[in-house]
Structures are given as C-alpha cells and as structure tokens.
Amino acid sequence: MDYARRRQAIVNREGWEEYRETVRRQGSRPPSRQRPGRGGNRFLLILLLLLTAAVCLALLRKTGGPEPEEIQGNLPEYVTQDLLTENQWSRPGAALEQINGIVLHYVGNPGTSAQANRNYFNSLADGSQGIYASSHFIVGLAGEVIQCVPLTEIAYASNSRNDDTISVEVCHPNAEGEYSPETYRRVVELTAWLCREFHLDPQKDLIRHYDISGKLCPLYYVEHPEAWDRLRDDVEAELRAIAEED
C-alpha cells in the first residue's frame, strides 16, 4: 500500500481500524500516532530547567560572601578615604563586577608619601599627561593607607587584570624597592583583610604586577622571589590569626 493510500485510509476512525486490521493480516506493524504538541512541551521543559539552573547559580553567587558595597562600607579603621575625582584617566567609575585577586605594586618613586602618590593620580584627571593610572589603595612609608578608588570600581593599575582585581600601590624608601618594616606590616594586614572579605587564597590569589605583564613591579619582590614567598606566607599567617579572632 503506497503513502497516498495510507493517508486516505486513516482519514476517519473506521478507516484507521480497517487499515490496522489489514496490516495485522499482512504481519506488519502500523505506525504509531504522534500526540500533537509533544515537541512543544519538551521545549518548554528544557527552557524551564535552564531558567532554574540560572536562578540557582545566581543564588549561590549571592550567598558566597558580603557584596563589595557592604565591604566598602566597613573598611578597617587605619584606612583613610581620599577618593579621586571621577574622570576617564584615573577613576572612570566603571563597575568592578568580580574580584578574583589582589595585585601588589611599588610606586617606583623612592621616598614619596602615600598622599603625594594619591595626588599624582588625581592630577591625571585633566588628561594633559595622557596617562591612565590609579590604584584602589596606597600604603605609605609609615604604614598609613589611603583609599583612592572604591572597591566597587575598577582602577587603572594592573593591565589585563584591572577588571577583576584589587590593586595596592606601596611606597618604599629607596630605589631597591623593599618595603620598610612599618609598610610591610601594613601591607600584610591590609591584604589579609582583603583576602578574608573576598574569600581569596594568599598563595594563589595574591600576585605581583610582574605576574601579569612582566613589568619589574614590585621590583624588590621580583628580584628576590624568596622575599615574595615569605610575604605571602606572612599574609596567610595573618589571615589565620584573623579567623581565630572571629
């Protein structure tokens, strides 16, 4: 029986039963009827599953820890806020949507203070120097800390990692770039606090500018890798101490 005759045979119920009987006698199995709308239901089910998965993922991210806005509102008492004026050269105001690391730098200008370096970043606002540069924090020679850019915004310090890291510029007393004892202690304290707040691992999420771009920054801790390893170990120890206090 050809296709056209089969279609004609199943126009009505009686024809369908007659066709089934004919096929039974011939020893063949008739084609099964498809339920209308079944494909559409399957599509809706898949769409519902995808939407559910997206909502669950968003909830997991939401409950992963405090939001940057909350952390920004609860800075350590040793941090002084002196935010840069919003401008395209040093504080563009673009949202920092994720934080996957902390980048340490050195200012490269021996003997200068945290305030002087903050003012330099702010002086870039008019664009006359054509330089993009800034940092979230600057740690000074006496251990003072100035915040230049909120934790909710990107800073121009770490090249390709500007959009997912917090940057910390560090002052140093001489051209070798080694942090002074007061500065070193504050760097350890600040970075340990940041690691706790953003659930970061000092051994893999605390990096040098050098690790991103190959720039010799922070100079001393590039030329002396054992000193860099010790700094990360000290941050890890501080992080453990903070956890015990909590």
Image: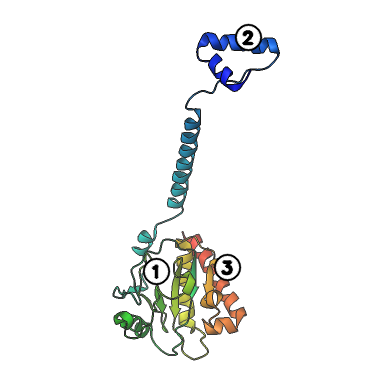
Mark with earlier residue (1, 3): 1
Residue 141: quadrant of the picture: bottom left
Badge 3 density bin: few <14, some 14–19, many ≥20, Cα 10 Å = few
Identity of the residue drawn at 35% across and 86% down: 129
* Number of the front mark, 1 or 3: 1
Amino acid marked by disc 1: Ile
Q: Where residue 139 sits: x, y (%)?
A: 42, 79
Amino acid marked by disc 2: Glu
Residue 154 image label: 1
Q: Where residue 186 sits: x, y (%)?
A: 45, 76
Quick check: marks 1 and 2 in contact, CB under 8 Å?
no
Mark with earlier residue (1, 2): 2
Badge 2 density bin: few <14, some 14–19, many ≥20, Cα 10 Å = few
SS of the residue under disc 2: helix
Residue 21 image label: 2
Residue 203 image label: 3
Residue 83: quadrant of the picture: bottom left
Identity of the residue drawn at 35% across and 77% down: 89
CA separation in Å, label 1 and label 3: 23 Å
CA separation in Å, label 1 and label 2: 76 Å
CA separation in Å, label 2 and label 3: 77 Å
Q: Residue furthest right?
A: 27
* Number of the front mark, 1 or 2: 2
Identity of the residue drawn at 49% across and 63% down: 100
The quadrant of the image that shows the N terminus is top right
